[in-house]
Amino acid sequence: MMQAVYSFVTVVAVVAAAAVAGRMHGGDALLLSAIAYAGFAVFLVGFCYRVVKWAAVPVPFRIPATCGQQTSLPWIKSAGLDNPSTNAGVVGRMALEALLFRSLFRNSRARLDEGRLICSEQRYLWLAALAFHWSLLTILIRHLRLLVEPVPAVVLGIERVDGFFQLGTPPLYISDVVFACALLYLLLRRFRDPMVRYISQFSDYFALLVIGGIAASGLLMRYSTRVDVIGAKEFALGVASFHPVRAAALGSMFTVHVALISLLAAYFPFSKLMHMGGVFLSPTRNLANNSRAKRHINPWNYPVKTHTYAEWEEEFRDKLKAAEIPLEADHGGRTAAD
Amino acid sequence: MAEELLQIEVKKPRGDWKDPAVQFRKGVFCYSAAPKNLRALDLPNAREWQPFDADWKLPPDWKRILLDGMRERLRKYRSFRLFMDICVRCGACADKCHFYLGSSDPKNMPVVRAELMRSVYRRYFTLTGRLFGALAGGRELTEDVVKEWFFYFYQCTECRRCSVFCPYGIDTAEITMIGRELLNLIGCNTNWVLEPVANCFRTGNHLGIQPHGFKDSLEFAADELEEITGVRVEVPINRKGAEILFVMPSADYFAEPHYYTLLGYMMLLHEIGLDFTFSAFASEGGNFGLFSSHEMMKLLNAKIYEEARRLGVKWILGGECGHMWRVLHQYMATMNGPADFLEEPVSPITGTRFTNARSTRMVHICEFTADLIHSGKLRLEPARNDRWAVTFHDSCNPARAMGLLEEPRYIIRNTCNRFFEMPENTIREQTFCCGSGAGLGTDENLEMRLRGGYPRASAVKYVKGKHGVNLLACICAIDKATLPTLMDYWVPGVQVAGVHELLGNALVMHGEKERTRDLRGEPFAAEAAHA
């Protein structure tokens, strides 16, 4: 629990600092641009560094976790996606994993019912995770409106669909609602589920709280304090085109939003958020289960000192003879030195 | 066991996992390896000690050895480095571990088991951990942590059930394997793992059976088969020029109920007239090296190819065994191949090419037998198994490291009339471990085995109540060795058998006498006797 408190205090401190800075230097967008640049530079360099570092480590053995029938006899139907034996199958398995969270979909909850252990299906975590990631992606794509001019048709299309219900002015985005709900669920789960609370660490709360701060400041700007969108876009375009501009004062909420995004970006490569890149490299998922059909090479395979047949025969020669088991060499010592 | 049944309960996790203190209570840990076994294998720090001792007599520079060992493995295994980095602690794995479910000890949640190692990794190998220590999830490596590692890495059966549910495929077995390797570096091993390894290195099998003993066992089995069936089967050993080398786990010819499976193999191989040989040198398919270190695994496994080459066989057939097949399927060719001196396996009886084994050139007996049955090469009388209501326990490794799910079921369905599946979330890739795998199946560890085996037993109990199941079939030597104890304790009245025992019962042999008894010497069910 202290871990959650520490995270909360850290995030509140950053928010307060950003808010104060936003008030004091309301117009000083250059400082804010510098923070954004720093955050994203750390993100890009750090992310690439981590991925390259993983990729540079060999995969000595082919160890897929098989989650279905293998490919063996032609009349037995194999599970092409859960236990792929071809590279195409692996692409399918990885796509299911990355896009639909296949493994999490299997989730179950174990409970004891009158002495009997029951594992029943439990899909809330899967649903919340899927909702969280997909709505986050939608929101990121929508933000391209602020970073690209003219706004791409795809972005406009997604915006239209996302605002389909036309509730209120400005229209409420479905993705905003879904994202906020999923985030709250994931956060509450950390506090309420005794197992998850036990395993949660500073970084688990911290990531969620920073993202929560970004979401809250964003929602407030859109639906309540109504940030100057033209000014915000001017700022964002300036940053994106590497010509930061001294834009009009955008207020504390905007400063908080950008500061937290920069913080998250900089924190990303040092944290568990790297699962974004790591999921594609997992050897239990991204290898075909064909290790008996195709030899997998271990680049650092090295010779070991084994106990050879000759040594074995030498030791048990008399017993082998007495048991009339065929021998390789009949007189002592000849093969022992081989 | 006379005392009361263990109480299995769901307790809310308490305390802080970062506190490494563990209690080596009788019944929940394995004893240390005898120094002679370490010496036989040239392993470091051979000495007399026990886990409950205060002083483990670690080498003076144990900390440097462990950290250097970690650094080396972080450079050699992508799995290890990645799994140290990407866990988000979503908790999906938490209640998937049979040891957590059976013990309610929160450190048995797979995520925490891994965190025991991860926290040390963060502290010594990441920037944030070095700067912020505990706040970044880091933990100092102390002697208490070493003891904790020993306790929990020998309280994991490397069954990989958690890995099936992990959204990133984080495999606790990888972490446990590396953890045990590291502990090996400072001489912290268990005898139940190292004695079989030392035996196997010298005699060729875990039990330390010497060649004449091997022959005696098989001859005895042939005599017994002759009594039961009236047919004399051959016992070829170390025979050069045979087409196929047959390798099985040593328990098959030395322990019960494995032995009845051996009888089943011998009947089958005789009945189809296979040109094969056993080997007294490659007299072990199982590989406890897997439970010790990658190097140990490689060095024990090497004899299989060496023997196949020496005998000049075309390909290799392997018996029923779980972790044996993990090694044969996922490691053997990489470690000790290429097997270019063998030929692509083709069944001499049906002509079927086992293209799935075209490189390693080793076929699982269930694949081989399923093909025989499917091709109509065997005469089977399922009614001879009518005294059994059968359920099938998927052994961890064939299920989650191969996907050998349908072949054994096909054999069971063709040899038994009454077959019932356990609940869906407890079979196939979601199967629950016997609780005694990965070298934990020793009696001093009995309480933890019974706790870990509880989820499996609970599912068996369910089908026993619902369908009257009285036989738990499986294809793993460790299962056969440990499930009977588990059944006696939690589900009395359920026996354990290999799939090829059921095949042996049902197999109608050429020239057999009128059969009245099954391979256990028990009479067939009344109506089946004259079927």
Image (cartoon, rainbow, N blue to C red):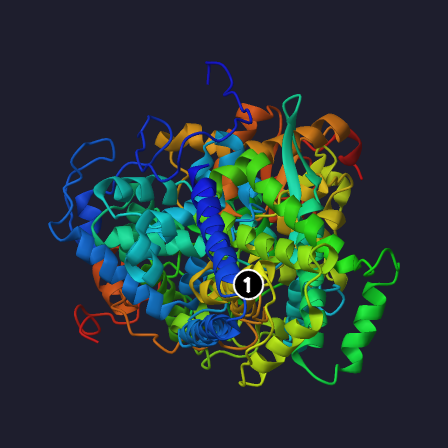
Instruction: Tell me the kind of residue under disc 1.
Output: Thr
Q: Residue at x 70, y 42 (%)?
A: A122
Q: Position of residue B324 (x, y in %)?
A: 47, 56
Can residue B436 be seen here? The reply is no
Q: Chain of mark 1?
A: A
In the foreground, A123 or B421 = A123
Question: Picture quarter containing residue A76?
Answer: bottom right
Q: In the image as oriented, which residue stretches furthest toward the left?
A: B60
Q: Nearer the viewer, residue B108 or B289?
A: B108
Left or right: A182 in relation to B270: right
Front one among B296 and B389: B296
Give the answer, above or below, for where B51 lies relative to A91.
Answer: above
Residue A309 can be seen in this image: yes
Q: Nearer the viewer, residue A243 or A140?
A: A243
Q: Assign a secondary structure to mark 1.
A: helix
* Relative image position of residue B305 (x, y in whole percent): 41, 70
Q: Is residue B110 above or below residue A195?
A: below
Q: In percent of the image, x 30 and y 71: which residue is there?
A: A328
- Residue at the disc numbered 1: A255
> In the rendered image, which quarter contains the C terminus of chain A?
bottom left
- Quarter-of-image position of residue B424: top right
- Total number of numbered discs in the rendering: 1
In percent of the image, x 30 and y 74: which residue is there? A302
Report the side of B166 relative to B505 (left or right): left
The reply, left or right, for residue B454 in relation to residue B205 is right
Mark 1 crowdedness (10 Å alpha carbons): few <14, some 14-19, many ≥20: many
Horizontal and vertical percent position of residue A37:
48, 75
Residue B462 image offset from top left, x and y in percent = 70, 30
